[in-house]
Amino acid sequence: MSMKKDAVDMQLHMAVKGLAILQGEINCNLEEIIKKAKLLQEKEEEGEEANHLLEMISDNVNELVDLFKRRKELLNQIENLKRIQNDLMKE
């Protein structure tokens, strides 16, 4: 049983580590969207064409949606591992 608990502990540790990394990616992506949105606003105020920035923002938003889906999956995995861990503690 101890080996099984150790395995679950390791999986939980790796999932939490993955979640932290993923959150960093989400934060970076959000910062990129904000930078591009500010630049887009400046370009529009100057009367310049900035459709390429809209496309880049759209790509960032699509990537962000994927990152949030991955985060949700990881959060579910963590919750499942916590349940398994608690069940093993009761044995």
Image (cartoon, rainbow, N blue to C red):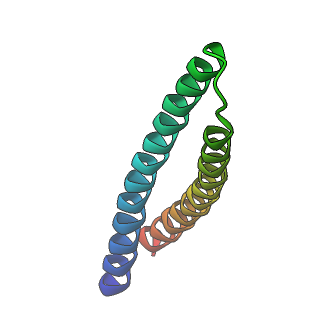
Viewer-side residue, 55 vs 67: 55
Task: State how many labels appear.
Answer: 0
Residue 59, image x and y in percent? 63, 52
Note whether 73 is above or below 11 in the view shown: above
Q: In which quadrant will I find the N terminus?
A: bottom left
Note whether 10 is above or below 15 in the view shown: below
Note whether 41 is above or below 35 in the view shown: above
Name the residue located 63 percent from the left edge and 24 percent from the top edge: 48
Q: In which quarter of the image is residue 85?
A: bottom left
Residue 2, image x and y in percent? 30, 82
Viewer-side residue, 62 vs 79: 62
Q: In which quadrant will I find the C terminus?
A: bottom left
Q: Which residue reaches farthest top?
A: 45
Q: Is residue 73 left or right of residue 35?
A: right
Q: In this view, does 88 lie to the left or right of 41?
A: left
Residue 62, image x and y in percent? 67, 53
Residue 19, image x and y in percent? 44, 56
Name the residue located 49 percent from the left edge and 44 percent from the top edge: 29
Name the residue located 49 percent from the left edge and 46 percent from the top edge: 26
Q: In which quarter of the image is residue 27?
A: top left
